[in-house]
């Protein structure tokens, strides 16, 4: 597959509204679609105007804990995820690959439909200011999964969804709430555990 195929997958996934999408989230999704059409290489990190990234909100098998990484450059606890690679065939596949690489956990499962979108300014590893058009997915670990920290993390730990660490990345609480909603819907649970109000 090529970046053109990955771009086509992203466009197809983002045509559908996200569950519980409000007008602001719908407008953001439309902005993602417009960006995909306007920029020739939106999935490549070399795209200076900004590029798509894929994140994984990783829950344990009970849905009671989330795995977060203390990101060395950002200096805050974040969900797992990162840039798309040439071998990625779908955005969900990119998120799953990133989650497996950063968590060291085998047997992860992913919901292939995005749970949330976010755009934020960053300085990438190339040293240039840009934007990440982040597409976030729910990933679930098998029972008893023990993470193994990679070189990409200062720390890696399970946190109760209602007791998140500080400093916490600004988009993490909203992404976690979206993940818990999807997890609860898939499990047939009314409501979801309350993430920390941040």
Image (tube, grey):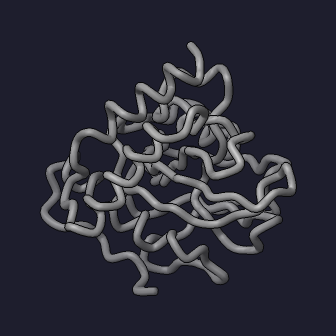
Report which quarter residue 85 is drawn in: top right
* Residue 153 percent across, percent down from the top left: 78, 57
* Residue 115 percent across, percent down from the top left: 34, 52
- Residue lying at the far bottom in this picture: please name it: 198
- Residue lying at the far top in this picture: please name it: 1
In the rendered image, the vertical position of residue 7 relative to residue 104, given as above or below: above
In the rendered image, the vertical position of residue 69 relative to residue 148, given as above or below: below
Q: Residue at x 69, y 58 (%)?
A: 130
Picture mark count: 0
* Residue 41 percent across, percent down from the top left: 60, 33
* Residue 128 percent across, percent down from the top left: 81, 57
128 relative position to 88: left or right? right
- Which residue is more in the foreground, 86 or 110? 86
Q: Residue at x 51, y 62 (%)?
A: 119
Viewport quadrant of the N terminus: top right
Q: Residue at x 38, y 56 (%)?
A: 116
- Which residue is more in the foreground, 10 or 40? 40
Q: Residue at x 29, y 61 (%)?
A: 27
């Amino acid at each position: 597959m090529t970046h053109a195929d990955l771009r086509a997958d992203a466009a197809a996934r983002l045509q559908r509204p996200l569950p519980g999408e409000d007008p602001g989230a719908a407008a953001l999704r439309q902005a993602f679609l417009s960006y995909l059409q306007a920029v020739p290489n939106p999935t490549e990190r070399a795209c200076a105007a900004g590029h798509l990234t894929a994140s994984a909100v990783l829950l344990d098998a009970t849905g009671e804990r989330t795995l977060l990484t203390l990101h060395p450059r950002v200096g805050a606890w974040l969900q797992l995820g990162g840039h798309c690679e040439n071998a990625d065939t779908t955005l969900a596949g990119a998120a799953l690959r990133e989650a497996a690489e950063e968590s060291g956990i085998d047997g992860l499962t992913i919901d292939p439909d995005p749970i949330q979108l976010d755009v934020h300014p960053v300085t990438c590893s190339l040293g240039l200011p840009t934007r990440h058009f982040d597409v976030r997915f729910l990933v679930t670990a098998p029972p008893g999964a023990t993470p193994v920290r990679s070189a990409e993390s200062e720390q890696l730990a399970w946190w109760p969804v209602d007791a998140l660490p500080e400093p916490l990345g600004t988009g993490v609480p909203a992404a976690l709430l979206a993940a818990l909603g999807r997890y609860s819907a898939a499990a047939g649970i009314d409501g979801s555990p309350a993430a920390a109000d941040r």
